[in-house]
Image (cartoon, helix red, strand yellow):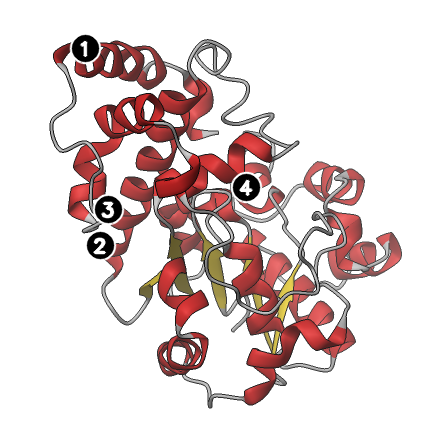
Amino acid sequence: MNPYFFIVGCPRSGTTLLQRMVNAHPEVAVTPESHWIPRLYEKPWALKENGLIEHKLVRELAAHPKFARLGIGRQELKRLERSGQTLTYSRLVTALFDLYGRAQGKPLVGDKTPDYVRRICTLHGLWPEARFVHVIRDGRDVYLSMREWPKVHPKPGDFTTWKQDPVSTAAWWWGFNVRLGRDAGRSLGSELYYELRYEALVTFPREECKKLCAFLGLPFDEAMLRFHEHGARPDPGLEQKRAELPATPGLRDWKSEMPAEELERFEAAAGDILDELNYPRAVPRPRPQALDRAASLRRVLAQDPRALD
């Protein structure tokens, strides 16, 4: 059943690279980033008392800017609504993914929306057999990517702490997302949840793609390694930079690009999760003032309701 899988992870962790590699597989299509799937489902007006979708949900979905990227017209959406079947939210989304797959000539369809790392439990409730691929990248390289990324807004760029301390804010945001994903993954088990390290993917792409295919129950296909040769990207809303490159190690290097003071601040805020993931620290013992600063920032961000949005 589609959605067959979700690719998730803290933004700037390499989910787009993996999306392009998986989308090159002859049996799998990966939709452009959606963002609307859990958000619409959680609206108080989305469902009737019997669990069926409300007309307002269909109207809001048709107007959502991300929905247009699926290439499914409003008439097709209305036809699904009028089909007469008992249309729950999960069945509606499944039907939309099936339509997308048919248009791509592929039977299996997955979604790549990094922010869904914070919505794994909701998505699992809707599709209990869907699999989750959690891409994890060294948070210090994630910060370097965020720093140069024009789309840090809305998150983490809209947190009040970003302007005064983007390093610590990025560290907290990375650790927060990674931990939520891992906690949810433990509850799902190894048949439905898979962690993929970005560093391994770009260094050993063939081996990592083979292991990923085994998790997804698919045969490995060489096309996954040649994804960059086709030029077209599955998500027209994403940046063009490096679109022609294959999987390439070393595009970010915190060891040479981050000053010592930034490293200390990052590791003071996220050293525990770096340790948990076996990423080596540059500053094993941050100074007390750095730890106090990180603790104060964590308290502020932990109370921000936008964190889980």
Contact between marks 2 and 3 (CB within 8 A): the answer is yes
Q: Which residue is mark 3?
A: 183
What residue sits right under mark 4 in the picture?
41
Upstream in sequence: badge 2 or badge 4: 4
Relative to the observer, which residue lies in front, 185 or 280? 280
Residue 112 appearing in the image = yes
**Cα–Cα gap, marks 2 and 1:** 33 Å
Q: Residues within 10 Å of mark 2 (few under 14, many from 20)?
A: few
* Label 2 element class: helix
Residue hosting label 2: 187
Distance from the alpha carbon under mark 3 to that under mark 4: 22 Å
Tag 2: residue type?
A: Ser
Three-letter code for the amino acid on which mark 1 is drawn: Asp
Inter-mark Cα distance, 4 to 1: 39 Å
Q: Nearer the viewer, mark 1 or mark 3?
A: 1
- Circle 1 residue: 292
- Compared across the picture, whether 254 is left or right of 89 comes to left
Amino acid type of the residue that numbered disc 3 sits on in the rendered structure? Asp
Q: Is residue 74 above or below residue 84?
A: above
Q: CA distance from mark 1 to mark 3?
A: 26 Å
Could you tell me how far apart the alpha carbons at marks 2 and 3 are, in whole angstroms? 7 Å
